Image: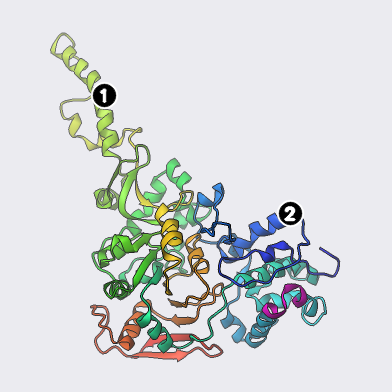
Amino acid sequence: MDTGRLSLGRVSSKKTAGHKVAEVPEEESDSDDALLATALPRVNGVAPLVDSEEDGFGEEDEDSNDEWEIDSLFEDTLEEMGDEHLFEGEPNACTLEEAGAFRQQLRTIGPEEFCKRTVEAGTISAKKLLTAFGLRPPPFLEGSPDDAYYGLLSLAISRELSKRIKLPQYNTVDDAVELIKKSNNIIVLTGAGISTSLGIPDFRSKDIGLYSKLEHLGLNDPQEVFDIEIFRQDPNIFFSIARDILPSTDRFTPTHAFIYLLQQKGKLLTNYSQNIDNIESVAGILPEKLVQCHGSFATASCVECKYQVPGETIFPDIKAGTIPRCDRCIANLRALRAPAAMKRKRSQNGHDKRKRRFDSDADDSSEEDYDIPAAGVMKPDITFFGEALPDKFSERLTNHDKNLVDLVIVIGTSLKVAPVSEVVPYLPAHIPQMYISRTPVSHVNFDVDMLGDCDVVVAELCRRAGWDLNHEMVPKNQKVDIRLQEGFTSRHIFTVKQ
């Protein structure tokens, strides 16, 4: 880094497909670029999608293809600052108005000139400028000289330039309704938030999420319960909590019903679901319209011989707290054991009168079968850390959906799970995008944000569209209050009127 200069390096010219970014001079060495490029995905919790000659969905190296991440490494060390924090006037941070001006200036004049006019000119500190791009200065740098924040500012600027630019013509709830009514190839990307009204816990909610309840397992990180290597070493860890996430209902939520309604009206292109509860299928979403990105409990496979069975086959074992074993492995072991058993039987019929270890009831003893160490464990076909996502995920997105989609609706997810979180920035930037969830996200610029209970939001959208969303969980004559969040032009808060 040049003395007194903020050097951004070549990493800022990396770009996500379909996004506008400003080019940055190539000042850093290749090794520095590699280091920054490695760190950059962790800013958003996703890997960057660099345009290739084939314009594919990012070339995944061996390491990135072997795992999906729930929380980014970046979030382990740095704290995000959403625009709502800036609006609330946090001390030592830019105001929301100042942040908007800095972001616009960055895109207008480019990062090199931007840095000259701000940090290098002394008009604002790098520490404070971080907040304009959604980063809270980390406590471990408190008291350090301002240039200690330059590396973080470089990442923050790179992240800002990689963001999709909001489409200014879509701002209101009525805009969202009209988009839904006129669109015919809608991608719906869903997360745990669409199932919580059925009592199914999400993973990361404070105090009530699944991860908050796993301290008794003694894991270094609660996410290890879904680590494939740990599962292979000790499946008891996963099966000790599996009953808590086991789908045990034939019900579905109004949000699932909304997605089904889109399908019935010929508007649903694809539902990309991060959920493993398989409720989309219960709601009637057709297999050809559904991509279960992280697998589901619908099927289970033997970790040894890959024998696959319907998921409900192993549900009794899961509910009983036992490890389900592979019937085919057990049958094969019985077959291998049979000659020796027959030999012992003939010996007993002859001169050997010693009592056999296995009496005539041995074949009826499930205890014996389940104690066979070589019988494979039946693992639900959900995607663990260390496992590749289904091929259907990238094939459907790149070869089918990208060129057809005309609207993107993200519901009930914070978009922190890679690579599913890459779907939104990968799609063409001119395609309208809307967001429905309880809390906003800061790393994606949606055109319309609708905050509140997912079921409440979709029911109101259907009402305004003149569609019948008949569902027992939607009270008749439900009245919804919608207000524009102060300081924002396209963020709306939905609450049910009491």
Give, as a single range, the part of the protein colored magenta: 106-114
Q: Look at label 1 and name its amino acid.
A: Arg
Mark 1 = which residue?
337
Query: In the picture, residue 367 is in which quadrant?
Result: top left
**Secondary structure of residue under mark 2:** helix
Q: Main secondary structure of the magenta part?
A: helix
> Residue, x 50% and y 88% (percent of image)?
485
Q: Residues within 10 Å of mark 2 (few under 14, many from 20)?
A: few
**Viewer-side residue, 404 vs 15:** 404
- Distance (Cα) linking label 1 and label 2: 60 Å
Q: Which of marks 2 and 1 precedes in the sequence? A: 2
Q: On the rendered structure, is 447 left or right of 174?
A: right
Residue 35 among those drawn in magenta:
no
Mark 2 = which residue?
30
Residue 442 rendering spot, x and y as whole percentages = 56, 75
Residue 406, disc: none
Residue 74 rendering spot, x and y as whole percentages = 61, 63
**From this viewpoint, is residue 147 visible?**
yes
